[in-house]
């Protein structure tokens, strides 16, 4: 298998949790992984992104080649569009449809979502609603992880196990809500 | 036995150093090097082995502490970001003259593209300047393996070794195969020729001659290095020198099947024979290096050479990080046309967090300065550099660690009526204290605002050496108690804080205002726990 994923959002939205869980799954399943992220000043409330590469073959570069990503997964629609040049022509863009407005000149939302919908392969999700349905509003990133799982040649049960381990220290209630959020994201259309 | 772990390049390196028998890690936080020390600090194994893993006040202190450990026969590393090497250049350069005893690795993470930095300097220049070997891992696995190799190199040639990282290796995770056992630490054993550590001119001259003589040994080591490889290719129309992680982009561009001969270069000085072979057998040469065109410039020579290509002739971009697309284009490979950026995009720059104490300090301080007139606020390195952006537009300059105070003093010396410096608590102990002493010495009319958020905020909340000591430090340096003022930067205290700033800025002598409130990020983490 091979899957190159660009994860995008705004500092503090939790894209690195997605990367961390998939990274652990990869090591457990003996799949090669490279995951590049930015720390330091660039994360303070500004645009952030990470590249996550999974492959059964050894991976060379830490960054995904422009025009070669299989997936763009974003917590926020404008940040999703920022990485469009990374996406391969048959790649899919998955994004939360709720904007994070912390700048004065955020574009007109309907026009922005229209651009997303016009892409050949795009999935717009209401992650907040699905997270609420899961029983924990914080699970928006786990909803996206569920959506990603449809594009990975990995047994979803293995990812669910990794989610359970990731949240184990926070108690049974948090774990079961996270697993439910994963399933809701996986089934979201 | 071995284990596979998912590690950042920085973390792989720290684990490699633990497994290679390190006794002490010495560092000051700086992106992208911070996670090396943090790995030691969170490692149970490092704790059990009694490895030193406390932050130092600045890079100069870290460098010299590591030198001390090396003199005692132990293995030690000093870690810093690229500009940190400037702060400890004196100790670094002279450690090459005294030489090392136990393995000494000066570990520097460069930040091409300046994700979180003030410049793009390439530490390989420093290695060449100090005339010592340089290693540049190309993968997380090499980052793990290099400490053992580099410590041996350092001990064999009694020289410090510079290990260079760049952002994309420091901050990228990969599956790394690690040993399940650590080599024992070196026993304490002082040098057989201890007088070489005393750099009196007579001794330094002798040491320098020896260092010059060692150059041939260093070159030979590069020829034989497992990290330098000449990989043959059938098509000799082009030969490629791929330095450090540049090799990964090359491999990615060709899917691992580069048709041209390639010199994979990760140890310097440049191996002459390997390089000569490539230059002789190939028609054109492309140099792929992350950072500045160090190797390319050496090969081109002062008068240029039309067959050498890279960043200098525009085959690759002159500045910024490399990426696979740039290498694809440099190798004349097909690269897809990319869509134009959406017109919907807006810049979303980093900014001070909601509720950040620095924001309240800037609001009060700019109001006081505007009221007094002929005032400028000189900034420093930290989150608070973001005070340059709207809505604050507060600071006039940001140069290097500690420079707020000394630049403000220079401006005051030149006639600026109201000179103000803003500096973080950790930056102040890093290199602000000596500048403040200068100002006190001359009783310069200067106000230093220490933004005390009780942590090193920008690099993620490390402990600051200033914690609980700031008032004592500034009073000890000679600021009279009545001109050491403490304020709490909160919206509710705005008027009160403006008044304090006005009084102290108007005072025709040195004063210090400590604006103290905990970083909102570290506070949030504590509340979560």
Image: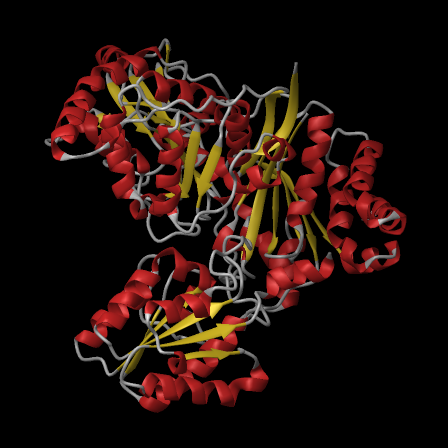
Q: Residue at x 47, y 36 (%)?
A: B25
Q: Which residue lies at the image location 43% right of the left edge and 52% below the top edge?
A: B116
In the image, B254: left or right of B106?
right
Quadrant that contains the C terminus of chain B? bottom right
Q: Is any part of residue B123 visible from this angle?
A: yes
Image position, residue A182 (x, y; %): 82, 45
- Percent of width and height locating residue A147: 76, 44
Q: Please state, as top left, top right, bottom left or bottom right, where the N terminus of chain B lies in the image.
A: top right
Asked whether the viewer can see residue B125, the reply is no
Is the image coloured rainbow, by chain, by secondary structure, or in one colour? secondary structure
**B143 or B119: which is nearer to us?**
B143
Q: From this view, report whether residue A25 is shown above or below residue B441.
A: above
> On the image, which quarter does residue B304 sit in?
top left
User: Foreground residue, A124 or A132?
Assistant: A132
Residue B153's spot in the image, x, y percent?
36, 18
Q: Residue at x 36, y 19 (%)?
A: B155
Q: Give the total of numbered labels.
A: 0
Q: Tell me if A16 is positioned left or right of B484 in this view.
A: right
Q: Position of residue A94 (x, y in %)?
A: 69, 48
State the residue in front, B434 or B316. B434
Say whether residue B64 is left or right of residue A97: left
Judge whether B409 appears above or below B429 on screen: below
To which quarter of the image does residue B43 belong? top right
């Amino acid at each position: 298998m091979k899957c190159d994923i660009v994860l995008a959002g705004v500092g503090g939205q939790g894209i690195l949790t997605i990367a961390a869980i998939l990274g652990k799954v990869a090591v457990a399943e003996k799949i090669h992984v490279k995951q590049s992220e930015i720390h330091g000043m660039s994360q303070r409330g500004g645009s952030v992104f990470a590249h996550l590469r999974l492959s059964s073959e050894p991976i060379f570069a830490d960054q995904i080649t422009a025009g070669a990503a299989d997936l763009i997964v974003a917590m926020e629609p404008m940040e999703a569009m920022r990485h469009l040049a990374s996406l391969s022509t048959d790649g899919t863009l998955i994004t939360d449809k709720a904007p994070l407005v912390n700048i004065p000149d955020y574009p007109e939302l309907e026009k922005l979502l229209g651009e997303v919908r016009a892409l050949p392969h795009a999935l717009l999700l209401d992650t907040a609603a699905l997270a609420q349905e899961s029983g924990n509003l914080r699970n928006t990133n786990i909803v996206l992880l569920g959506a990603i799982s449809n594009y990975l040649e990995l047994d979803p049960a293995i990812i669910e196990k990794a989610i359970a381990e990731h949240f184990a220290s926070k108690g049974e209630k948090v774990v079961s809500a996270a697993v439910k959020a994963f399933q809701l994201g996986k089934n979201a259309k | 036995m071995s284990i596979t772990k998912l590690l950042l390049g920085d973390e792989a390196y720290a684990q490699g150093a633990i497994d290679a028998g390190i006794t002490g890690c010495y560092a000051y936080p700086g992106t992208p090097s911070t996670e090396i020390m943090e790995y030691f600090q969170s490692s149970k194994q490092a704790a059990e082995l009694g490895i030193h893993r406390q932050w130092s006040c600045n890079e100069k202190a870290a460098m010299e502490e590591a030198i001390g450990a090396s003199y005692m026969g132990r293995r030690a590393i000093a870690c810093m970001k690229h500009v940190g090497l400037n702060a400890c250049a004196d100790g670094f350069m002279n450690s090459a003259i005294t030489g090392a005893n136990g393995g000494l690795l000066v570990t520097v993470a460069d930040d091409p593209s300046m994700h979180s930095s003030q410049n793009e300097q390439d530490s390989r220049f420093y290695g060449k300047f100090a005339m010592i070997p340089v290693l540049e891992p190309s993968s997380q696995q090499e980052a793990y393996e290099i400490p053992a190799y580099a410590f041996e190199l350092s001990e064999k040639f009694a020289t410090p070794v510079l290990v260079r990282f760049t952002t994309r290796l420091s901050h990228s995770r990969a599956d790394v195969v690690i040993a399940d056992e650590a080599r024992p630490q070196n026993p304490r054993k002082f040098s057989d020729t201890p007088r070489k550590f005393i750099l009196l001119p007579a001794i330094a001259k002798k040491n320098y001659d020896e260092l010059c003589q060692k150059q041939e040994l260093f070159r030979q080591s590069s020829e034989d290095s497992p990290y330098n490889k000449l990989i043959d290719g059938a098509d000799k129309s082009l030969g490629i020198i791929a330095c450090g992680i540049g090799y990964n982009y090359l491999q990615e561009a060709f899917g691992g099947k580069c048709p041209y001969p390639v010199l994979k270069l990760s140890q310097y000085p440049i191996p002459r024979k390997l390089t000569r072979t490539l230059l002789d057998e190939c028609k054109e040469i492309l140099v792929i290096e992350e950072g500045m065109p160090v190797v390319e410039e050496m090969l081109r020579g002062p008068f240029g050479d039309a067959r050498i290509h890279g960043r200098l002739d525009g085959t690759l971009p002159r500045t910024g990080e490399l990426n696979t697309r740039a290498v694809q284009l440099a190798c004349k490979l097909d690269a897809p046309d990319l869509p134009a950026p959406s017109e919907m995009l807006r810049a979303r720059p980093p900014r001070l967090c909601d509720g950040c104490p620095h924001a309240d300090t800037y609001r009060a301080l700019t109001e006081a300065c505007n009221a007094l007139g002929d005032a400028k606020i000189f900034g420093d390195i930290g989150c608070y550099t973001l005070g340059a952006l709207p809505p604050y537009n507060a600071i006039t300059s940001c140069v290097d660690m500690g420079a707020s105070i000394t630049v403000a003093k220079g401006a005051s010396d030149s006639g600026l009526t109201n000179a103000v410096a803003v500096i973080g608590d950790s930056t102040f102990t890093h290199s602000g204290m000596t500048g403040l002493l200068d100002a006190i010495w001359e009783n310069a009319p200067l106000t230093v605002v220490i933004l005390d958020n009780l942590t090193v905020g920008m690099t993620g909340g490390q402990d600051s050496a200033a914690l609980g000591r700031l008032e004592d430090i500034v009073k000890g340096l000679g600021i009279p108690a009545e001109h050491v003022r403490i304020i709490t930067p909160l919206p509710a205290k705005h008027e009160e804080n403006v008044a304090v700033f006005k009084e102290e800025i108007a005072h025709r002598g040195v004063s210090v205002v400590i604006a103290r409130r905990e970083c909102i990020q570290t506070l949030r983490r504590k509340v979560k726990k």
